[in-house]
Image: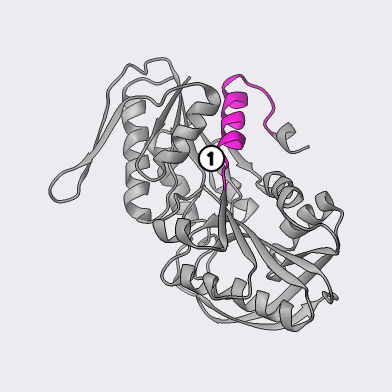
């Protein structure tokens, strides 16, 4: 097999390569003066099992086009099988019609990846599991919960621990983490008035004297998480920390997190962290390289991937 990477998260791709003891393949991804993307695969991939590692993170459209063009180049170079490895699938939040005359962009992007020539997709913590059904090719949705649970056991005070879902939609993910930690579960009930803004309405569960761990798949503006942390502290929680898979952290999110009630925010490197994120005192990054690397190795050798999460 061979590993290739676009420009979205080169550091993670190199870490995956080190885990697999496999160097990244030689590929040139550059732009013309008008920002048109050009790709050249600089080594033979005929008959190879190729894995293209690329998150569709900011700038999402540029990185998506890079992915599509790399896949097309691989297909035309006669690669035997092309697996698109998307640590972060950027259009996953647009998984349904949110109102009249609106798109389902996650389905559109799924079609684009399939039509470009991908034979398989591997991703991490999709915003909604049913997005796997948008693809007409095999799709592996990996889970970060085991990775996060291990980090919690190593770094957090497990006494009086309580797992908290920041909204009703994340209960399944929070319950999976609570089961691994043998901890009780609470839910923050919120009402969202406008995109990127939320108002906490109620906390379901007694958090008094508890060390609360908020768990979610994506943090963007950080408003929901900060409001949830404030509500937990007002309700009598001893501390509030958060574990989030995808740290989008757009706009003033890093400053908002730094000034919030959160003791610590832990994110993965599914999206390449900015200098602001790396410099924040209460934000810590855990790597997904070993998880993705092992899943890639098992896919290449036709072994079970689901057994990683047993």
Look at the image and give the residue range highlighted in magenta: 286-305
Between 4 and 262, the one nearer to me in the picture? 262
In the figure, is residue 204 to the left or right of 243?
Answer: right
- Helix, strand or loop at mark 1: loop
Instruction: Give the residue at mark 1.
Output: 136
Image vertical order of residue 182 relative to residue 48, above or below: below
> Residue 94: x percent and y percent?
50, 62
In the figure, is residue 224 to the left or right of 171?
Answer: left
Image vertical order of residue 147 relative to residue 274, above or below: above
In the image, farthest residue toward the left: 33
In the figure, is residue 207 to the left or right of 258?
Answer: right
- Choose top left, top right, bottom left or bottom right for residue 172: bottom right
Is any atom of residue 105 visible in this view?
no
Is any atom of residue 216 visible in this view?
yes
- Choose top left, top right, bottom left or bottom right for residue 274: bottom left
Residue 141 falls within the magenta-colored stretch: no
In the figure, is residue 104 to the left or right of 288?
Answer: left
Which residue is at 61% across, 29% downward? 294
> Residue 153: x percent and y percent?
76, 49
């Amino acid at each position: 097999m061979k590993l290739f990477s676009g420009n979205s998260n080169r550091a993670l791709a190199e870490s995956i390569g080190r885990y697999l003891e496999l160097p990244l393949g030689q590929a040139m991804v550059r732009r013309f003066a008008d920002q048109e993307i050009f790709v050249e695969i600089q080594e033979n991939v005929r008959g190879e099992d190729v894995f293209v590692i690329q998150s569709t993170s900011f700038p999402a459209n540029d990185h998506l086009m890079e992915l599509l063009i790399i896949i097309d180049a691989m297909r035309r170079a006669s690669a035997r099988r092309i697996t698109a490895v998307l640590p972060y699938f950027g259009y996953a939040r647009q998984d349904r019609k949110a109102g009249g005359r609106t798109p389902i962009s996650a389905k559109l992007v799924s079609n684009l990846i399939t039509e470009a020539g991908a034979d398989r997709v591997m991703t991490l913590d999709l915003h909604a599991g049913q997005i796997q059904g948008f693809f007409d090719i095999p799709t592996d949705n990996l889970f970060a919960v085991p990775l996060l649970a291990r980090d919690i056991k190593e770094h957090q005070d497990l006494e009086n621990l309580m797992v908290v879902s920041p909204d009703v939609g994340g209960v399944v993910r929070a319950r999976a983490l609570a089961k691994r930690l043998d901890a009780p579960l609470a839910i923050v009930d919120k009402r969202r008035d406008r995109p990127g803004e939320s108002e906490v309405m109620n906390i379901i569960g007694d958090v008094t004297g508890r060390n609360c761990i908020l768990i979610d798949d994506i943090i963007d503006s950080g408003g929901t998480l900060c409001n949830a942390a404030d509500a937990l502290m007002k309700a009598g929680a001893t501390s509030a920390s958060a574990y989030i898979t995808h740290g989008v952290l757009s706009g003033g999110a890093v400053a908002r997190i730094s000034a919030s009630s959160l003791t610590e925010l832990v994110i993965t490197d599914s999206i390449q962290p900015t200098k602001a994120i790396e410099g924040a005192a209460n934000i810590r990054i855990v790597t997904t390289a070993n998880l993705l690397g092992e899943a890639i190795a098992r896919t290449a050798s036709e072994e079970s991937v689901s057994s990683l999460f047993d």
